[in-house]
Amino acid sequence: MPKPLHLALRRLAPPVLSLLAVAGQAHAAAPDAGSLLRESERNLQAPRPAERPLALPAARPMDEDAKALRVAVKRIVIDGASLIPVAELDALVVDRIGQSLTLAELEQAAQRIAAHYRERGWYVRVYLPRQDVTDGTVRVQVLEGRYGGSSLENKGRRANGAYVQGVVTHRLAEGEPLSAADLERGLLLANDLPGIRATGLLEAGQSQSQTRLALTVEDSAFVSGDLGITNHGVKSTGATQAVGGIALNNLSGIGDQLALRALAAEDIQSGVVRYSLPLGRDGLRLSAHASTLRYRLGGQYKSLDAEGRALTGGLTLSYPLIRQSESNLSVSAGYERRSYDDDMLRTALRRHRVDALTLGLSGDRRDGLLGGGVSWGSLQLTQGRLDIRDVADDRATDAAGPRAHGSYTKLAFWLNRLQALGTSGWQVAAALSGQLASGNLGSSERFTLGGPNQVRAYPVNEASGDEGLLLKLEVQRELGNGWQAIAFYDTGRIRQHKNAWAGWQGGGGQPNEYGLSGVGLGVNWRGQGALSGWLLAVSAAVPVGGNPGRDAGGHNNDGSKASSARGWLSLSRTF
């Protein structure tokens, strides 16, 4: 570009940018550092490792001759119960009085009591002692397990066995009743530690009611990671993206982790580094992270010569209130500092700084409803402050319209359910997410409808708003050999501006509130055997009902026709 023309464009940049900021409200403005970082953070999420359930010793089978004997039951006496009222236990077996039962049926009645203890979170042994039952009185012996200590076999080179043992037994006290819930929590927390594997076996102690824990600690993988390719990017910076990550697990012996994840496309690069470590022995964990992003807009925005960068840094504390194989509940608190710089024609367009405090609650629960299912979700409250600084025209544009500068509050939620339909191989999935805001937000905090994880019939960043609601429904069919077919319906609604202002549409006539919907089909594949670790997801979707946010030419924000079909692809390999 000739130098005089370039200087003229730079002088014109501030008023042109102000006009673009207003006109952009009528349709999607060019992507900026805030919105691009928001989308890249979605694509940089690492997969979660599978849980290792607690293994309990199996019950001994009864002698076949004993199963055939019958007893005319007139009375059942429960001995040894102290943690649960005897009257409560009597009610579990009262229906067996007055019947002629085999010893096998009496054993089943005794196991009702054992199951009741387990539901209350206690480890117990319930059995029929040697006795004379000729008078019809049956005695059931309850041995409430008492913790008798633990032994350690440390097979790991890196794992600090004594520390892991402390995690497992943190809530157990010698001589006290053995809580199955506390033991399970300890084992699961130990296995949550990166690079560590812990297994426990319950053994008889020195006395009849005493139970000891034999703990084995081993190393798991020191290096783990994944590498993949997707078309989940923003079109103007490169839809095709390479995404990957690597983690170094258990560097210090106590389950800390150093992880790096990166994303690269034609005109965007981003990465995040994170270090986390446990604090104490009861699941509290501290995580520190920093991320960076650089971009240059191409495609329909190439003539703007727009580029920018984002930097973030933060700390997060998390703690598991409940940690069980069937249900979990965690709380978190975090602080993050973010900076977003956007330039156009080599002139500063935006200089935004955000300070945000976040409180979170997340959990999951598995159940046996119908063929079994799992529910999970999270709630996140953010209190932040957006500082629009340095660029006078940007501050003036905000003051004349959105007034996003200053404090804000945002509440976001995610609710999910995966339900098996018996043993047929069919299952259904439902996901509901949304966001409420106290006022107009900066681009990094907004809720979007379009994309591979939202309304799949529309491009990334389509339909962005301060508030929104999204519902996704899927029918899934297991095909065998790791293949799964899906059919889905996605629908959502946004409010572009919590507080609309006069002239925000720029003459475009676009509604402040509108919705998008789409339907589609897809296949997922999880590699088996020698191909274990490979993951493939392919889907195609078409819009339903049109896009009220399209431009005058009937286009989405990426320039594609609002009525066109869309396909998504993700291929990755974990190691």
Image: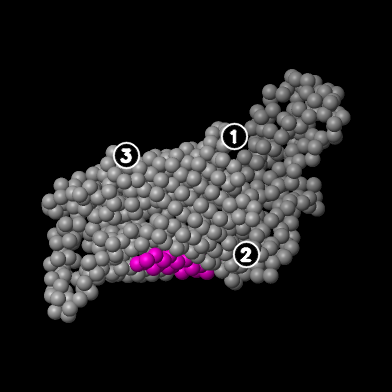
Residue 280 at least partly seen: no
The residue singled out by tag 2 in the image is 221
Q: Residue at x 61, y 41 (%)?
A: 120
Separation (CA) of disc 1 from disc 3: 33 Å
**From mark 2 to mark 3, how far is it between C-alphas?**
46 Å
Above-or-below relation of 301 to 322: below
Is 276 left, or right, of 549 in this rendering?
right
Q: Earlier in the sequence, mark 2 or mark 3?
A: 2
Mark 2 or 3: the one toward you: 3
- Residue type at mark 1? Thr
Tell me the quarter of the picture where residue 4 sits. Answer: bottom left
- Indicate yes or no whether the magenta region holds residue 270: yes
The disc labelled 3 sits on which kind of residue? Val
Start-end of magenta stretch: 255-278
* Residue nearest the observer in this picture, 29 or 336: 29
Q: Could you tell me which residue is drawn at 56 percent across and 50 percent down?
A: 526
Q: Residue 423 — which label?
A: 1
